[in-house]
Each structure stands twice: as structure tokens, then as C-alpha cells.
Amino acid sequence: MNPAPPSTVRPGPALSFSVLGFPVRARADFFIVSALFGSSGGRSLQDVFAWVVIVFVSVLVHELGHALIGRVFGCRSTIELHTMGGTTTLTPADGVSRVGHPSWFGDLAISVAGPTFGLLLGGVVWLASRGIPTLPLEHEETARWLVRQLLWVNVGWSLVNLVPILPYDGGQASRAVLRRLSPTEGDRVAHVLTVALGVAVIVVAVVLRNRWGGSVWVGYLAARGVFGSWAELQKSRGARSLSTAWAAWDARDFTASRAGAERTVEHARDSRVRGAALELVVFSCLALRDAAAAKKAFDAYPEELEPSALLRAVVALDREDGTATALLRQVDEAVATRVLLPLITAWRETPWQERVTAWLDASTVSALPRELQERLLALQVSPLPSPR
């Protein structure tokens, strides 16, 4: 299951069809990888074909479980079968921009629906195998092999998938519960749990590598979860560090704000977090009247990202290149007030008072939010043209 926009579907050759009103796209690599796994052990071409059909039907039933329960909670779903199995992408059926589910319980129900449908299919297969009359000897072994594979794919994989390791269904379910228990820390705890359990699973997989053939595959899946959650933990660590730096800014402690933002830049692995931290470094350095450091931080901005409209506006004001007014009109009122008011106030009665004079001409003031204009006037920042 993947509560993400449908644009995450990758291009490439695929078989497209619809089941129960849900668009399904089975990529070529799904069939290729399934066939490679089915061919291990020297199975015949007929057995490989049967294995691919088993995997195709089983994964599709699993994803239909997510999609059907998603429909109950007001979500539209698209299904994609790919190398790693399947993904059900959910979007709100009412067209509301938020992505996901109406409640934590909906998230939980949709997460466990896939493995539940797999277990139900496995149960049907087991019951059917008990009730089928004895087959001729030449077909009995093939029939037993088919039943074993169906039970492994549906029962075995469903149970493995319920282990609370992200991004798999058990991890999604545990995250839903943890978010309910702690909206602020639920995500982080879910990722910590994934790392701890994932490492344990990898250790067990290494110990059992010579006793159980599937241990390598399970170990790989656990490692995938561990690396993904570790990366998310690093991002959240950077976000928390940046939040602390912004709190110092709001308290007008620009030295602490700069130090916190610089620490975030140093440790951030995500370019977006690093870019946001560099913006605060620029603002803090300007508040401290350190133009050289502000320029150095701006020059270090990640090349793959575009600075915010506010940062570009501040640079444009300083360079007097004529684009500041248009850029300021793009800035959210709360953001503009949060940054510009402390910045301009910090320059009052300092050698940088001239910058206030240069920045706050009639054109610039007209682009500022009305509340910010009034607050600057109340501070008697001079010379400040009256807003028209």
C-alpha cells in the first residue's frame, strides 16, 4: 500500500487492465523477476509458468484487499505490480487535496487488508486441497507442489508482511497506531522500531542462511526497510534541529539561531532540509549584520533546488535588481512577517539603518502584507513611506 499521488507510477512496458473498477498496471519487470525466482531449482518451463501465475494472482488479490477497504474509507485506488511485488496508490475520492485516509483507524484497516486477503486466499486453497479427491500418481506431486507454493505466497508472505517493519504493511499498521498514540512522535517511533526489528531480522536471516532458502530474501527485505527508515530518521533529526533554530529566531536570539541552522546544514543529508537551514543561516547572518557570511551561505545553496521567494526577494532587495516587489507578492503573509519584521527591527539604530532606508521604498512597502506594513510603522522604522 502506498498513500501517494498516482504520479508515482513509473513509465515502461506494462499490461494494463481493470478489476472491480480499479485500474491495474502490471509492469514487465514483475513477470521477469517472478519467472527468475520460479526457475530456481531447475523447475520445468511448465512449473515456471505456473509459479508466475500463482504470484500474479496472489499479489493482485493482496493489492485488491488494500483497494477495496480503501474504497470503504472514501479513497480511489490504482494498482501497480512491479519488481518488489505490488503497490496500491490511494487518493481521496472526493478530490480533496489531502492524501491518505480519514482517520488513523482507516489507515490501520487499509494496511492490514492486503495480508488479510492473502491469508483468506491461503485458507481457501488449504480447504480446497483437503476436499479434492486423490489424484492419479503422475499428477499428485504437481498438485502438492502447486498447493505448497500457493500457501507460501499467500500465508507465508502475508505473515512476513505483517511484521512491523516499514514500508511493508505491518509497518504501516504499526505507524497508524503509533500516530494515534502520539501524533508528534508516532512517525519517528515507527522508524526506530523498523530499524531495531529490521536489524534483528537480518541477524536471524544470516544465521539461517544455510538452513532456509528464503532467509536471504527476507533479510534483503528487512535491510531495505532499515535503510529507508534510517534515512527518514536522519531527515526528521534535521527537521527537529531546524525547528529549534527557528524557535531561537522567534526569540530574537539570532546567534543561537545561526548556530542551530549551521549545525543542521552540517548534518543534514536531505537537500531540502539543508536548503531550508541555509536560508535561516542567511537570515540570521543578516540579522547579525554579517554580510560576508550571509553571502557565503547563499552561495552554498543546493544547486538542484530553487531558493524560496522570500530569500530571493531579500537578495534582490540587497542587489537592487528590481525583482524584489514581484517576489515579495509571492510570499505567505505569516512567513514574511516572521522573517522581515525581526530582520528590519534588528537593524534599527545600527550602521545598517541605511539598508532599511534602501529597502523600504514605496514599491517594496506596497508589496508587503498590510499587517506587516502597520507593524513596521508602529515601530517607527524611519524613513518608512506610509502604505497607500
Image (cartoon, rainbow, N blue to C red):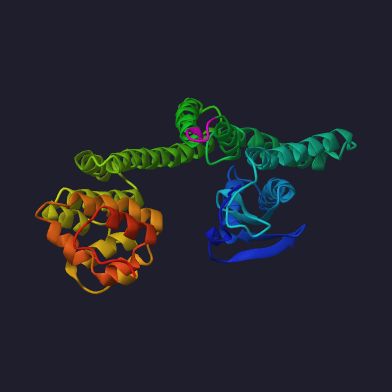
Is there any visible trace of residue 20 in the rendered image? Answer: yes
Residue at point 19% right, 71% down?
Answer: 320
- Count of number-bearing discs: 0
Give the camera-side residue of 229 and 354.
354
Q: Which residues are magenta?
A: 182-186
Name the quadrant of the C terminus: bottom left
* Residue 24 horizontal/vertical position (percent): 67, 59
Classify residue 15 as left or right of residue 129: left
* 234 in relation to 31, above or below: above
Classify residue 21 as left or right of residue 98: right
Is there any visible trace of residue 47 in the rendered image? Answer: no
User: Farthest residue in the left direction?
Assistant: 351
Give the camera-side residue of 111 and 119.
111
Residue 106 occupies which quadrant of the picture? top right
The answer to if 184 sits in the magenta stretch is: yes
Residue at point 13% right, 61% down?
Answer: 354
The answer to if 140 sits in the magenta stretch is: no
Give the camera-side residue of 169 and 91.
91
Residue at point 62% right, 34% down?
Answer: 162
Residue at point 28% right, 58% down?
Answer: 377
Classify residue 295 as left or right of residue 42: left
* 146 in relation to 130, above or below: below
* Residue 306 horizontal/vertical position (percent): 32, 62
* Residue 271 horizontal/vertical position (percent): 33, 52
Q: Please name the predominant secondary structure of the magenta segment in the image.
A: loop
